[in-house]
Image (tube, rainbow, N blue to C red):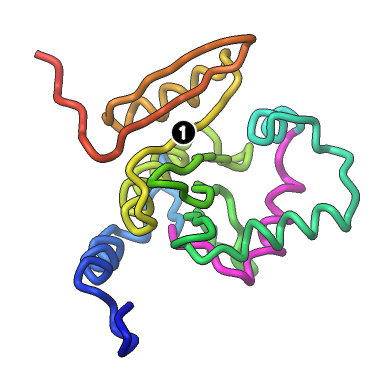
Amino acid sequence: MDSSGRLEPSSRAVMQRWEAIPAWFLTKDGYWLYARLIRHEDAPRLLEMFDRLSSETRRRRFHATVDYIDEAARAYYAHNFATVDNLHTGGAVVAVDHQGAGQKIVGVLRLGAPEEGCAEVGVVVRDDFQGRGVGRALLQRLPTLAQRMGVHTVTGSMEADNLPAIRLFRGLHFPMTLNTSHAETQMRIALSSPALPSA
């Protein structure tokens, strides 16, 4: 923002691009979900989603066994994950199920706080929504979220046998490098230059 509180032209352009992305999307089996930036009031929804993740999904996302953390720690982490500014302290896009009572988060795409244009990325989808295109829909919004946050390179780590996650990120069609060591794969994606289609 400038001194008058108005968005700079570059910031306005990013916001316009964000708003141009359809918020509603259909899963592969025809179920409507809504994608939006995370909000501070989403902390209880993150806790509810965490409760519905399997042990394997939790382990793959957090790279540790987190089934037995206490209530206070869970509330602390949920609060921290939800209270980002989607600019400097980190950002996230959530997939929200509006059907039934209340809003239920079923997927999260997260970018950590950027450092010199680089940020760590993570994606998790509730088990009953896996394989339905939710992760792909969230990743389609990654370049716009990254541009909003001034991020041109994203990094991530995953278990080397997590082939569905690797395929998901390859679907972005941006230059990507993978290095595997000790059963863990380190990923680096350059969002500033789309990959050219192979001949």
Q: Is residue 139 magenta?
A: no
Q: Amino acid at mark 1?
A: Thr
Q: Nearer the viewer, residue 50 or 144?
A: 144
Q: Residue at (67%, 32%) from the top-left corner? A: 57
Q: Secondary structure at mark 1?
A: strand
Q: With 97 as the anchor, is 77 left or right in this view?
A: right
* Left or right: 122 in relation to 36: right
Q: Residue at the left extreme?
A: 199
In this rendering, position of residue 153 left or right of residue 58: left
Residue 111 in the image: state x and y as whole percent: 49, 48
Q: Is residue 9 above or below residue 191?
A: below
Q: Quadrant of the C terminus?
A: top left
Residue at image location 47% in from the left, 61% down from the top: 88
Q: Position of residue 83 (x, y in %)?
A: 61, 65
- Judged left or right of residue 44, residue 158 is left
User: Eyeballing the image, is 69 above or below 13?
Assistant: above
Residue located at (57% from left, 24% from top): 158
Where is mark 1, residue-wise? 155
Identify the residue shown where x is 43% and y is 55%.
32
Quarter placement of the N terminus? bottom left
Name the spot of residue 81 as percent of width and height, x first.
64, 56
Toward the viewer: 3 or 185?
Answer: 3
Magenta residues (range) = 35-54
- Relative depth, front residue between 152 and 66: 152
Q: Is residue 174 above or below residue 13?
A: above
